[in-house]
Amino acid sequence: MRRGTQWTLLWAFCLCGWALAIAYMIFDVRGGALDLF
C-alpha cells in the first residue's frame, strides 16, 4: 500500500466524519431537539 493511498483514505475518513457531524447538527437544530448539548 502506497503512502498516497493511505493519506487519501485518511482524508476521506475525516471529511466523511465532518460531513456527518455537521449534517447531524443541522438536522438537530431543524428538529428543535438539542439533546447533544
Image (cartoon, grey):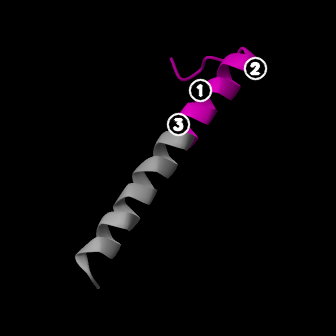
Give the dominant element type of the magenta stretch: helix, strand or loop: helix
- Give neighbour class at mark 3: few <14, some 14-19, many 20+ (Cα, 10 Å): few
Q: Quote the CA–CA distance across marks 1 and 2.
A: 10 Å
Q: Which numbered circle lies on residue 2?
A: none
Left or right: 8 in relation to 15: left
Rounded to the nearest angstrom, the CA distance separating label 2 from label 3 is 15 Å
Identify the image quadrant of the N terminus.
Answer: bottom left
- Which residue is the site of mark 3? 21
Outermost residue on the right side: it is 31
As for residue 34 lying within the magenta part, the answer is yes
Q: Nearer the viewer, mark 2 or mark 3?
A: 3
Question: Tag count in the figure?
Answer: 3
Query: Which of marks 3 and 2 precedes in the sequence?
Result: 3
Kind of element beneath mark 1: helix
Determine whether the residue tagged by mark 3 lies in a helix, strand or loop.
helix
Label 1 with label 3: CB-CB less than 8 Å: yes
Which residue is at the far left? 3
Q: Which residue in the protein does label 1 denote? A: 25
Residue that appears at 51% across and 50% down: 16
Horizontal and vertical percent for residue 9?
39, 66
Decide: few, some or many residues near mark 1? Use Cα within 10 Å; few <14, some 14-19, many ≥20. some
Instruction: State whether residue 35 is above or below residue 1.
Output: above
Residue span colored magenta: 20-37
Q: Amino acid at mark 1?
A: Met
Left or right of 2 on screen, residue 10:
right
Q: Residue at x 43, y 57 (%)?
A: 13
Q: Residue at x 40, y 50 (%)?
A: 14
Taking depth in this image into account, of 28 and 6 the one nearest to the observer is 6
Q: Please name the amino acid that badge 3 sits on.
A: Ala
Question: Picture quarter containing residue 20?
Answer: top right
